[in-house]
Amino acid sequence: MKLGTMMRTVLGSSFAAVLLTASGPSLAVDADAAQALAKKNDCFKCHAIDKEKKGPSYKKIAAKYKGKPEGQDALIKNFTTSPKVKLDDGTEEDHKMLNTKDVAAQKNLADWILSQ
């Protein structure tokens, strides 16, 4: 392979890797683990994937943060700090905290929600 061709191949591969890294949530979401964590923490009591319940659907949450790099951090903050959340009926309550300190599991759950 000629040096020029090799340089273009290496640079092209590097550029593609940068684009994939900067594109938002991790591409390797473990959906089963995320859903198991959500179920274990009763997240589905207030949220559903594609319909409104007491809280917004995961599709609605994903749409809210689409293209916004702060989405993952915002979700993790929401389920690790128990902030007051406003419900559709106008009432407010403390958001339930996840019962895990595992940062990788928190990120996976946030990425799964954002992938909806």
Image (cartoon, rainbow, N blue to C red):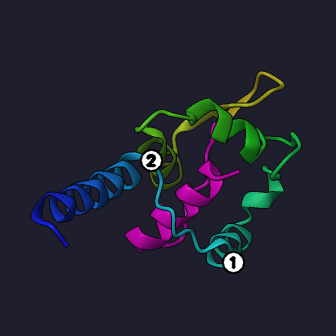
Q: In which quadrant of the rendered image does the N terminus lie?
A: bottom left
Residue 63 in sight here: yes
Q: Position of residue 115 (x, y in %)?
A: 64, 53
Residue 41's quadrant in the figure? bottom right
Q: Which residues are magenta?
A: 93-116
Residue type (three-letter) at the residue carrying disc 2: Gly
Label 2 or label 1, whichever lies nearer to me, is 2
- Name the spot of residue 46 as percent of width and height, x first: 79, 50
Tell me, yes or no, whether the two marked residues, 2 and 1, touch with CB atoms within 8 Å. no
User: What residue appears at the point 71 percent right and 51 percent down from the top-left corner?
Assistant: 116
Left or right of 26 on screen, residue 33:
right
Q: Which residue is mark 2?
A: 24
Q: Secondary structure at mark 2?
A: loop
Where residue 56 is drawn, which disc sits there?
none
* Cα distance between the residues tagged 2 and 1: 20 Å
Q: Is residue 104 above or below residue 76?
A: below
Indicate whether 53 appears above or below 32. above
Q: Is residue 62 left or right of residue 13?
A: right
Residue 101 visible in image: no
Q: Which residue is mark 1?
A: 32
